Amino acid sequence: MVWIEFFAVAVCAISGVLAASGQRLDLFGILVLALVTAVGGGTIRDVCLGAYPIFWIQNPSYIVAALVAALLTFVAARFFRMPHRVLLIADAFGLALFTIVGTEKSLQLQASGLIAVLLGVVTGVAGGVLRDVLRREVPLVFRPEIYLYATAALAGATLLVGLRLGVPDFPHAPLAAMGLTLVLRLSAVLFKLRLPVFRTKELP
């Protein structure tokens, strides 16, 4: 799973840079935003699991991967227009990758199925939440128009736990769960699928 986590860190760093579009941040601010997005969810996961040292402290190569991805994206964005859809796609990949990594690591550290699902979702969405808080915006996960963000992570994490506990010898469980998360999230964006919005009945 190491290569998946490296890829997740890089993709989330890219989404952090793209999310800074229009914020008028300098290079330092961009890199901070990228790093928070890339390692925020995994850091919270490791703290909750008591998995010390935290993954990017144990292996600083994760930080290097995030910074390189952020710098390349920063340079590319100065020469090419990055449409908003690119951010959504990068964020969807980051969501799928980190959700599966978080769920799998939780199971490896003997967490129960329920806790593994919850920490998988946290790993997938927390980096984006921290990123949006720093941007002083409502996090993507709380916006109704963002279309099945945490729901996609929940579905993927639940599938992975179900396969690991029910069919432990199935070798492609992480890929299947990752695919479900990604397909559900991208389909929701494409077809504008979302959960019902809470409304109270108006008094006459």
Image (cartoon, rainbow, N blue to C red):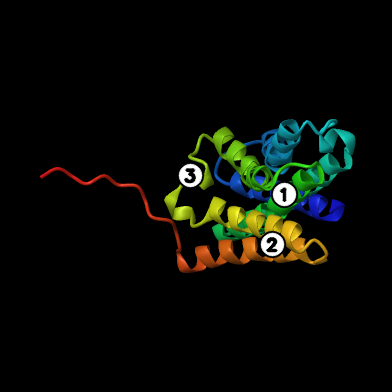
- Furthest toward the front, the residue is 166
| Image-based side of 143 in relation to 200, left or right | right
Query: On the image, numbered disc 1 is attached to which residue?
Result: 103
> How packed is label 3: few (under 14 Cα within 10 Å), some, or many (20 or more)?
few
35 relative to 148, above or below: above
The circle drawn on residue 142 is: 3
Q: Residue shown at 22%/46% (left/top)?
A: 201
| Image-based side of 3 in relation to 26, left or right | right
Query: On the image, numbered disc 2 is attached to which residue?
Result: 177
In the rendered image, is residue 27 in sight? no
- Amino acid type for the residue under numbered disc 1: Thr
Question: How far is disc 1 from disc 3 in space, using C-alphas?
Answer: 21 Å
170 relative to 136, above or below: below
Q: Residue shown at 48%/44% (left/top)?
A: 142
- Pick the residue in front: 174 or 165: 165
Q: Position of residue 172 (x, y in %)?
A: 79, 67
Q: Residue shown at 81%/41% (left/top)?
A: 109
In the rendered image, is residue 52 in sight? yes
14 relative to 50, above or below: below
Circles 2 and 1: CB atoms closer than 8 Å: yes
Q: Nearer the viewer, mark 1 or mark 3?
A: 1
> How packed is label 1: few (under 14 Cα within 10 Å), some, or many (20 or more)?
many
The residue tagged with tag 3: helix, strand or loop? helix
Question: How far is disc 3 from disc 2 in space, using C-alphas?
Answer: 23 Å
| Image-based side of 185 in relation to 9, left or right | left
Q: Position of residue 151 (x, y in %)?
A: 54, 54
